[in-house]
């Protein structure tokens, strides 16, 4: 089963606003509408069976509405695997984790940069203590700031992993958006998975091959970062830029099955 582990869809009432915010932050024009039907159409065209849908509450007040949306999507769309969201300043974390677990939500998305905390914040440690091994944890990692200054970075994630060895952890953007030299130094020798989202347009062929060699195709998960990018186009890049065997390609496309299905 081929799975895209990194997508985003939005309620129709806010989709246009969110797309404008994404374009403003990343200077990337989204290829998709950010709506469920558009994502499903693109998955079908790319021969991808399922997609993980991610959201991150940028304010504690958004936690419950965002998770309600995730639970609703799970009930309505077999092809979607929504992750939940938690904010460290939310005052009922344990209650919300229990609610997500009861509704068979498999994972959580963390975006320190957008959510307003650092990856080495003790408030995040408290959340990780409550999670134990109940959820897969997918972290946004990296940005244009130097790693030490950025809220998230490969070194901070490696330290977090050492503190909390129980949950499966996925580091988005090949381990750290624009922090790829540090990814190899700090994450390659851990058991953290990485996804391919928002990486291939920003790394050279040489760097892309180095990253794939460092992690091996057993720890790399395909992610498109829809609606910024299209799954079919990202798959074409994988095939064109890497000399992957058929087994290696299938690993990248289907590794998430072992975590999610």
Image: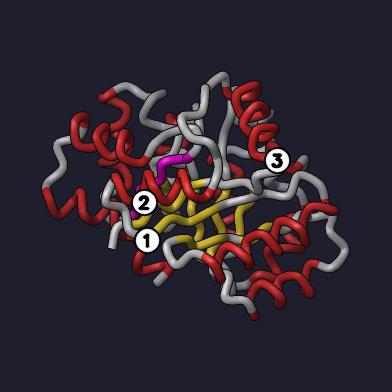
Residue 125, placed above or below residue 34 = below
Image coordinates of residue 55 in percent, x first then y, are 63, 50
Disc 1 target residue: 256
The tag on residue 221 is 2
Magenta highlight range: 219-226
Query: Disc 2 versus disc 3: distance between alpha carbons?
Result: 29 Å
Q: Identify which residue is drawn at 61% across, 54% down.
A: 109
- Left/right of residue 60 with respect to residue 143 in the rendered view: right
Residue 127: which disc?
A: none
User: Label 2 vs label 1: CA separation?
Assistant: 6 Å
Q: Quadrant of residue 148?
A: top right
For the residues bearing labels 2 and 1, Cβ distance under 8 angstroms:
yes
Residue sitting farthest toward the right: 91
Categorize mark 2 by other alpha carbons within 10 Å: few (<14), some (14-19), many (20+): many
**Does label 3 or label 1 sit earlier along the sequence?**
3
Residue 43 x %, y %: 36, 49
2 or 3: tag closer to the N-terminus: 3
């Amino acid at each position: 089963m081929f799975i895209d582990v990194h997508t985003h869809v939005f309620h129709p009432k806010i989709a246009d606003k969110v797309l404008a915010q994404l374009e403003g932050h990343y200077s990337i024009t989204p290829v998709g509408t950010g709506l469920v039907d558009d994502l499903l159409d693109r998955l079908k065209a790319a021969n991808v069976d399922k997609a993980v849908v991610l959201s991150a509450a940028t304010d504690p007040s958004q936690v419950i509405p965002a998770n309600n949306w995730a639970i609703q999507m799970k009930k309505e769309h077999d092809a979607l695997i929504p992750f939940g969201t938690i904010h460290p300043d939310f005052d009922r974390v344990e209650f919300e984790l229990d609610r997500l677990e009861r509704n068979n939500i498999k994972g959580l998305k963390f975006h320190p940069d957008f959510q307003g905390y650092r990856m080495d914040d003790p408030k995040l440690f408290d959340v990780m203590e409550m999670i134990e091994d109940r959820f897969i944890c997918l972290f946004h990692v990296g940005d244009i700031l130097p790693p030490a200054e950025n809220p998230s970075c490969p070194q901070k994630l490696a330290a977090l992993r050492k503190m909390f060895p129980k949950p499966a952890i996925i580091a988005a953007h090949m381990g750290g958006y624009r922090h790829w030299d540090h990814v190899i130094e700090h994450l390659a020798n851990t058991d953290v998975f990485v996804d391919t989202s928002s990486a291939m347009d920003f790394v050279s062929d040489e760097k892309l091959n180095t990253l794939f060699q460092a992690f091996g195709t057993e720890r790399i998960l395909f992610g498109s970062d829809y609606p910024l990018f299209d799954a079919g186009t990202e798959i074409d890049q994988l095939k064109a830029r890497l000399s992957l065997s058929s087994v290696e390609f299938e690993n990248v496309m289907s590794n998430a099955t072992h975590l999610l299905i």
